[in-house]
Image (tube, rainbow, N blue to C red):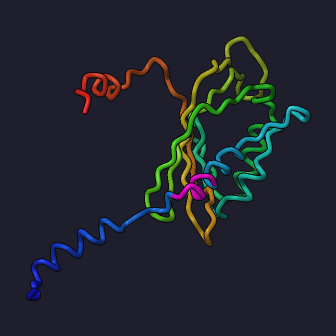
């Protein structure tokens, strides 16, 4: 068969696309799920949260934007901020956190994004004391966590969480419900 440059021009990119895969192995997914499960480990005996396992599996420059827009950057800063927020001021003492779901999407072979929905019991900011007008009712929250793969291991590098407002109307739910089945 004679050489056809146009055919190679068209087929080569298709071959490259068809062989392009991201690190979506069961082991990669399990490693990320393990890190997610290590986030906010509560010790009922001491009534404290332990963030040590997550921090040990984080990048040095890891960052977090919390539910009210506070920005913390760096592994050491995260450890101090979370300890102060969750352990020292007792705002979350005896507050139940329940993981409801998580999804993981591999963006590149070494970057993944997880969306984690958790249910958070009611609490009293800023210090856990009920003053009669400071209750935050129980609600679901959506956390987004970014992971990077370095040296064959997945590490947490950035995150953010938001309250899921049950009063909000998701325009996509209506659109998806009206869409014809494929």
Please count the marks in the image: 0
Side of 83 relative to 171 (left or right): right
Q: Where is residue 175 in the image (x, y as percent from the top left)?
A: 27, 26
Q: Quadrant of residue 136?
A: top right
Residue 101 rendering spot, x and y as whole percentages: 57, 35
Q: Measured along the vertical axis of the image, is residue 46 above or below residue 71?
A: above
Measured from the top left, where is residue 88 in percent x and y?
83, 38
Q: In this view, does 29 lie to the left or right of 87?
A: left
Q: Which of 182 and 87 is in front in this view?
A: 182
- Seen at 53% across and 58% down, the residue is 25
Q: Residue at x 62, y 48 (%)?
A: 33
Q: In this view, does 38 lie above or below 178?
A: below
User: Seen in the image, is 96 located left or right of residue 161?
Assistant: right
Q: What secondary structure is the magenta-colored segment mainly?
A: helix
Using the image, determine if residue 131 lies above or below residue 98.
Answer: above
Q: Is residue 89 left or right of residue 103?
A: right
Q: Position of residue 167 (x, y in %)?
A: 45, 17
Q: Give the residue at x 19% y 73%.
A: 11
- Find out whether residue 29 is within the magenta segment: yes
Q: Which residue is the extreme one toward the bottom? A: 2
In which quadrant is the C terminus drawn? top left
Question: In which quadrant of the rendered image does the N terminus lie?
Answer: bottom left
Report the front residue among 106 and 59.
106
Location of residue 70 by image quarter: top right
Q: Which residue is drawn at 71% across and 54% down?
A: 77
Residue that sits furthest to the right in the current view: 45
Q: Is residue 71 magenta?
A: no
Please state the extent of the stretch shown in magenta in the rendering.
25-30
């Amino acid at each position: 068969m004679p050489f056809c440059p146009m055919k190679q021009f068209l087929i080569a990119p298709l071959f490259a696309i068809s062989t392009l895969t991201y690190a979506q192995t069961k082991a990669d997914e399990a490693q990320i799920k393990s890190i997610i499960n290590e986030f906010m480990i509560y010790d009922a005996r001491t009534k404290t949260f332990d963030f040590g396992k997550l921090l040990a599996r984080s990048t040095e420059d890891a960052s977090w934007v919390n539910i009210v827009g506070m920005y913390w950057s760096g592994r050491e800063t995260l450890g101090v901020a979370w300890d102060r927020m969750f352990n020292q001021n007792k705002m979350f003492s005896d507050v139940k956190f329940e993981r409801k779901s998580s999804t993981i999407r591999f963006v590149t072979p070494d970057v993944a994004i997880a969306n984690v929905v958790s249910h958070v019991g009611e609490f009293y900011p800023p210090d856990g004391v009920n003053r009669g007008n400071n209750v935050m009712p129980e609600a679901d929250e959506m956390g987004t966590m970014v992971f990077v793969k370095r040296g064959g291991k997945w590490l947490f590098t950035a995150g953010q969480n938001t309250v899921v407002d049950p009063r909000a109307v998701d325009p996509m739910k209506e659109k998806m419900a009206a869409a014809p089945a494929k």
